[in-house]
Image: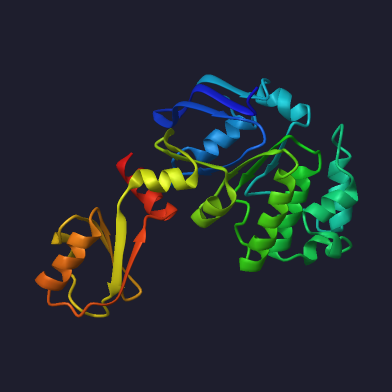
């Protein structure tokens, strides 16, 4: 039995179609990243998965049950983008209060340890940093020992160190055989932490596989070099170039044939080319290509 199953799921808001016939199966004990541009249908899909809204058509199942049944049975834990803590309560008091609402909760000490909150357990909620608040939200999401953990932009407002510590906590929880589904705009997080990456655009799946498979599927490579203030109008006309980007004093060319592009770059342009680099497509390149074509 799959952890998550969407069967021809659609959701409309009047004339606006947010999700269009979504078919999706996620086995148990996987860590899956859900990617998509704003308005792609990610939040709507997550809301249907949690039973917060109903599909216009199709069915959603979580461990073979409706989302409402799975939520009431403590099968799903969710960390959403919004939600406030009670200012007067300490971290430990907040977590303990929530865990007691579930039929089979994790122990308080275990929750605090996994969420990396032990050292600040006695600190009041109104004295927490943004990253610490996010870690408390993560603790609340795992308090009921859910088999499915859903994270919506979990590292928003976190600094680099907080993000690193958060993903260490998430991997610890996932290692015990739990299923994790997370939506993020930080593509490097998906690349580093997900067993599987699902890209949606216009309410439908446009790519599904490992990060390596998705990057390979886009094809092509990038040629980049320092350009400074030199003119760049001729770059798009170079052989095999499908895209040009100027970023921080560098020209970045997407090309199907780096050798042909580089040869023409040196022969056919007056540019002073130096610090030349060739690399394969990364997940950001794949994401842009997939969502642009959808």
Tell me the quarter of the picture where residue 224 sits: bottom left
Place of residue 180 in the rendered image (x, y in percent of width and height, measured from the top left) = 65, 41
72 relative to 267, above or below: above
Residue closest to the eye, 60 or 174: 174
Tell me the quarter of the picture where residue 78 sits: top right
Residue 61 horizontal side relative to residue 45, left or right: right
Going by the picture, which residue comes out furthest to the front? Answer: 259
Place of residue 55 in the rendered image (x, y in percent of width and height, measured from the top left) = 54, 24
Residue 172 horizontal side relative to residue 251, left or right: right
Residue pictured at 53% horizontal, 35% vertical? 44
Place of residue 237 in the rendered image (x, y in percent of width and height, measured from the top left) = 13, 60
Residue closest to the eye, 167 or 137: 167
Residue closest to the eye, 149 or 209: 209
Residue 78 horizontal side relative to residue 12, left or right: right
Residue 241 horizontal side relative to residue 218, left or right: left
Residue pictured at 87% horizontal, 34% vertical? 104
**Scheme by which the image is coloured:** rainbow
Mark count: 0
Residue pictured at 74% horizontal, 31% vertical? 75
26 relative to 140, above or below: above
* Image quadrant containing the N terminus: top right
Place of residue 59 in the rendered image (x, y in percent of width and height, measured from the top left) = 56, 20
Quick check: can you spot residue 234? no
Quick check: can you spot residue 125? yes
């Amino acid at each position: 039995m799959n952890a998550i199953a969407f069967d021809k799921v659609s959701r409309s808001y009047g004339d606006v179609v947010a999700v269009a016939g979504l078919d999706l199966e996620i086995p148990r004990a996987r860590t899956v990243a859900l990617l998509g541009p704003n308005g792609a249908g990610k939040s709507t899909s997550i809301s249907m998965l949690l039973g917060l809204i109903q599909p216009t058509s199709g069915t959603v199942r979580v461990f073979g049950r409706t989302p409402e049944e799975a939520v009431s049975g403590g099968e799903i834990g969710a960390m959403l983008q919004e939600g406030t803590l009670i200012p007067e309560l300490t971290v430990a008091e907040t977590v303990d209060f929530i865990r007691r609402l579930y039929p089979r909760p994790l122990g308080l000490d275990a929750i605090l340890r996994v969420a990396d909150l032990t050292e600040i357990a006695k600190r009041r909620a109104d004295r927490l940093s943004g990253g610490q608040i996010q870690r408390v939200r993560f603790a609340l999401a795992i308090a009921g020992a859910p088999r499915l953990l859903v994270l919506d932009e979990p590292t928003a407002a976190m600094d680099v160190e907080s993000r690193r510590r958060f993903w260490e906590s998430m991997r610890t929880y996932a290692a015990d055989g739990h299923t994790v589904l997370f939506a993020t705009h930080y593509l490097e997080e998906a690349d580093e932490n997900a067993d599987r990456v699902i890209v949606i655009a216009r309410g439908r799946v446009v790519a599904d596989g490992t990060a390596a498979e998705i990057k390979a599927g886009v094809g092509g490579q990038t040629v980049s070099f320092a350009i400074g203030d030199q003119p760049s109008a001729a770059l798009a006309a170079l052989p095999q170039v499908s895209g040009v980007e100027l970023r921080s004093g560098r020209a970045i060319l997407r090309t199907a044939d780096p050798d042909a592009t580089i040869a023409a770059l040196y022969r056919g342009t007056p540019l002073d080319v130096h610090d030349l680099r060739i690399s394969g497509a990364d997940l950001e390149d794949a994401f842009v290509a997939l969502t642009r074509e959808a």
